[in-house]
Image (cartoon, grey):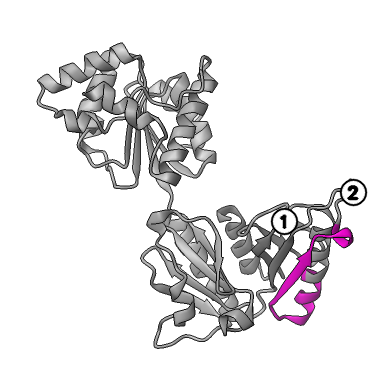
Amino acid sequence: MRELLDELTAAIARGNGVACCRLVETRGSTPQKPGAAMLVFPDGSQAGTLGGGCVEAEVKRQALATLGRGNAEVVKFQLDDDYGWDDGLICGGRMQVLIDPLAATPDREYVARLQALARDGMGATEAIVFDAEASGLPAGASYLFDAEGALAASVRGPVEGGAAPQAVRDGLKSLQERPRPYAAGGIAYLPLLSRCRLVIVGGGHVGQAVAALAADLDFDVWVVDDRAEFVTPERFPKAERRIAGTMGDVLPGLEITPNTYCLIVTRGHNHDEEALYHLIDRKARYLGMIGSKRKIKLIFDDLRAEGISAESLGEVYAPVGLDIGSQTVMEIAVSIAAELIAHRNLGIAGHHTRQRAAVAG
């Protein structure tokens, strides 16, 4: 969605016509789920997708019509014989799509505010009315909330004393829960979750492979290595920051927030231990370290001798990664990325919690 927002705001800035099609509610089997988006331009070209097939072609046809009328509409599609796929398969579900030609200034101001919240990475939630009868609000009314749940913008719907109507506020979930898109009382809630920073300490093969995956998984990647030739744009083209320097010089002053994930994958025992010493007890959301159980035990014993508590060591994910029988570098990277996703989305990393407790005990 963030990439589409950039393209959308660029089109608006150029003065180009564009209809933004948002999938707001589904039932049954559908090719995409709420939150999917597609931009339709006057020449019939598009960006993004709602799943392809005949239903997408019909959404595009209606989007082109709204560009002429200038009014936003919520359109319902029943995925039966009328909207089967080109290969004859039929999903059998239902989709409701908000088609917004963005003709009016308030619509464009709303999009600008949404893009600003997306850019700052703290998260936001859109509440879009798709059922006027169930909600008591106009279909297509949209409310944008910031990460703290404060109303940031609205369009096509009433506002009461600077706040969204109670019916909208009642269904709003905290972004701390990292909710998936959901619907309540005829209103679709589309969370734009906060971006988490991933600090990868070690620019070797594993760090490089994890960085490539993590960037595509909506982590803001920072890479640290004491060898400048290992933190180049060529090795880490998607990294937000590439930092060369010794562990002792870089890590103590590195910004660690409650939304920071730290991964230690250096080239050796001593570097891993030094990195862990500087990152433990820094209140990172996640701290993981690669290595065999024997190596981890030796490092933990050394850090206990340095005054690090068993409780703090028990918070370290080590050995890092979910157990999928990894052998190759890419398999190891996949296991680590899976653990990062599980922790970010669920607050846990499966059975690994018990492994951590056993290692630290």
In the image, is residue 317 part of the stretch drawn in magenta? Answer: no
Tell which residue pokes out farthest to the top in this image: 294
Disc number for residue 70: none
* Quadrant of the frame with the C terminus: top left
Residue 268 in percent (x, y) is at 32, 13
The Cα atoms of the two marked residues, 1 and 2, are separated by: 18 Å
Which amino acid lies under the numbered mark 1 shown in the image of this protein?
Leu
User: What residue is shown at x 29% (from left), y 13% (from top)?
Assistant: 295
> Residue 117's x, y, as percent?
45, 62
Q: How many marks?
A: 2
Tell me the element at label 1.
loop
Task: Please tell me which residue lies in front, 231 or 29.
Answer: 29
Is any atom of residue 57 visible in this view? Answer: yes
- Residue depth check, mark 1 versus mark 2: number of the one nearer the observer: 2
Residue at point 31% right, 22% down?
A: 226
Q: Earlier in the sequence, mark 1 or mark 2?
A: 1
Does the magenta run of residues contain 76? yes
Q: Is residue 220 above or below residue 245?
A: below
Q: Are marks 1 and 2 in contact (CB under 8 Å)?
A: no
The three-letter amino acid code for the residue at tag 2 is: Gly
Instruction: Quickly name the residue at label 2.
Output: 88
Q: Secondary structure at mark 2?
A: loop
Q: Does residue 356 appear to the left or right of 230 in the view shown?
A: left
In the image, the segment drawn in magenta is 63-83
